[in-house]
Amino acid sequence: MFEEKKTEWLRIAESLKPTLHRETVRPISGIPDHALMENESIILDFGNHFVGHFTLKLSSQGSHPDAPVWLAVKFCENALELNETLDGYAGWISKSWVQQEQVHIDVLPAVFPFPRRYAFRYVKIDILALSSKYQLVIEDASAEVTTSADDSVPVPLISDEKDIAIDRAALRTLRNCMQDFFEDGPKRDRRLWLGDLRLQALTNSVTFQNYDLVKRCLYLFAATADKEGRIAACLFTEPKVEADDTFMFDYSLFFIPTLLQYIQATGDQAAKNDLLPIALHQLVLADAQFDPETQLIRDNDKLGWCFVDWALPLNKQFCAQAIWIYCAQAALQMKADPLLKEKILHRKEAARKYWYDRERYLFVSGVKRQISWASQVWAVLAGIVEGPDAVACLDAAADCPDIVPMVTPYMMHHYAEALCRVSRKTQARQVIRDYWGGMVENGADTYWELYNPENPDESPYGSPVVNSFCHAWSCTPAWFLRSGILEENA
């Protein structure tokens, strides 16, 4: 399905591949003022988070080098990573993502460009071995750093010092994820994920306004849909453009509101005509997962069938229903369809009938009738509950002692947005100042993939050593602070 259009869609996507802005940066501290011996160690601080290629300029002091220099070089996104090791690592994400290298340099003096691209602020260099006849001199260290964001576009935020610091880290997060496409994280996974793209595009609209990059990503997803027309959760662009074999119920549907955001921002009718059919097709595909009698989505115990959040105990049945409604409502804004409108009403009614605990003002999910923050947030965002009942729902969640918590900035974004929907603007602003501001207070130049204020070292992967500390889905404080949504009259 759509096979005859994919070649043209890919051509359009590739025609929009950006020319990267390039800059050479050097560390603000850490270059030693003396020659180094075996077993010495230094830490270079580049003063901010960057993405790019690192180069060392080396020479020697003493006798002619009679053996290679052997270095261990570690690239860290923040200071928390400097002392982390792979000793005993047993996580399920490959440890090959960890930015550690060992290199031998046979001839000095030398200019040694590291071949890989890194995401870093700090570079730790350990001298593992050299000869006793000479010492190592680090004459210079530099990096050619890249982004497709134009730093001159965002206007300065006028606010208090804390909001400005929160906004600054959000901008840095987004711009360092803006490379040839919107990456989810420049350290890991360096892929185009649809859930991240939706929030990146939202934030881009009030910051860098690089709409061609959004358009490129939309066409990449359309061009890599499978034979049934399913849009993958993520895709690769090297060595060729290719969809991953991961499909998620919510991520495929999020193509719809992402397209809507782009059309609203640009008025690009050609892109709408091209991509609306495949966007609407995601709703058709999703219908197969609903019970036609009850209009409830069937639950699924397959890990990753629907993402929602990184809370492993989370039952996602209710959230999946709410996200279908949310995305179908976005589709209605692009194409009038009375049948779709009727289906949305039926599925809202079904959610309220089967999953709403009216005595507790809370929505449940799954056969165990689990109560989670995610379910309450998505009930509000989808309009399954509105007005005073929506306020009561969020208040009841805050008072529920055994509720499944939120664990990612991705889910916290949706919570803050839900608070805005029920006119709790002051509370939403405080969530941003406490949660994202907490990362800033913990030394973040860019926002993390996962942040638990009670346990900053938490990881869904088995170890924080593979966590991403510049992660796209965390960039949205800039949207909240710049879009006007936090204003009381918005």
Image: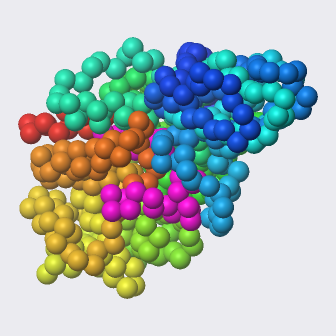
Q: Residue furthest right?
A: 66
User: Viewer-proximal residue, 414 or 311?
Assistant: 311
User: Viewer-proximal residue, 42 or 242?
Assistant: 42
Residue 283 point in image, percent of width and height: 47, 55
**Residue 196 is at least partly visible in this image:** no
Vertically, is 375 above or below 177?
Answer: below
User: Residue 104 vs residue 181: left or right?
Assistant: right
User: What secondary structure do most residues of the magenta stretch adopt?
Assistant: loop
Q: Residue furthest bottom?
A: 368
**Residue 247 is at least partly visible in this image:** yes
Displayed quadrant of residue 75: top right
Residue 285 point in image, percent of width and height: 54, 58
**Residue in view at x 35 percent, y 76 percent:** 365
**Residue in view at x 59 percent, y 21 percent:** 33
Residue 58 point in image, percent of width and height: 74, 21
Vertically, is 183 above or below 90?
Answer: above
Q: Is residue 62 magenta?
A: no
Give the magenta range: 452-477
Displayed quadrant of residue 31: top right
- Number of numbered discs visible in the structure rendering: 0
Q: Is residue 466 magenta?
A: yes
**Residue in view at x 43 percent, y 67 percent:** 311
Residue 64 point in image, percent of width and height: 88, 21
Vertically, is 284 above or below 16?
Answer: below
User: Viewer-proximal residue, 166 or 54?
Assistant: 54
**Residue in view at x 33 percent, y 67 percent:** 405
